[in-house]
Image (cartoon, rainbow, N blue to C red):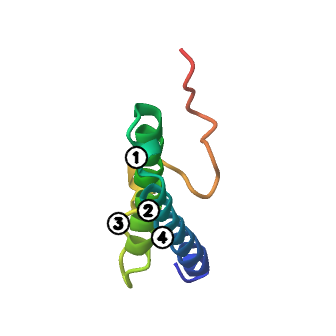
Amino acid sequence: MTDWTGFYLASGLAAAVLTGLLFIAVALRPREMTDAPGLLRARAAFIALAMVTYVSLLELIPGNRLVVGALPEWGVDLDDGPSSGSSTAT
């Protein structure tokens, strides 16, 4: 985890800053947020940035291995990439 700490700090900070800028943009241009495309774009951007912030904060908790640490248990191999024995094509 210690070699990933800088990555999670940077990605969490960047996502938090961009989320704040998104709120400012929505506050400055409320008329553009009343139509469906503008509202959908703002909502999708907020959810994506909030998830990056949330995952980064979870990974920065000392001793916590819930998110990325659980990926091998879910069948994701972080060391070797995709396994050569499995195929997604039928």
Q: Nearer the viewer, residue 7 or 25?
A: 25
The percent coordinates of residue 48 (x first, y second) are 46, 52
- Specify few, some or many for label 2: CA neighbours under 10 Å numbering under 14, 14-19, or 20 or more: few
Using the numbered discs, state the Cα–Cα distance from disc 4 to disc 2 in whole angstroms.
11 Å
Which residue has dot 2 on it? 23
Give the class, few, some or many, for how many residues have Cα within 10 Å of label 3's Cα (few <14, many ≥20): few
Mark nearer the N terminus (2 vs 1): 2
The residue positioned 35% from the left and 66% from the top of the image is 66
Q: CA distance from mark 1 to mark 3?
A: 26 Å
Residue 17: % across, % down: 52, 71
Q: Which residue corresponds to mark 1?
A: 43
Question: As shown in the figure, which amino acid type bears the numbered disc 4?
Answer: Ala
**Mark 4, residue position:** 16
Q: Are marks 3 and 2 in contact (CB under 8 Å)?
A: no
Under circle 1, the secondary element is: helix
Can the viewer see residue 44 in this picture?
no
Residue type (three-letter) at the residue carrying disc 3: Leu
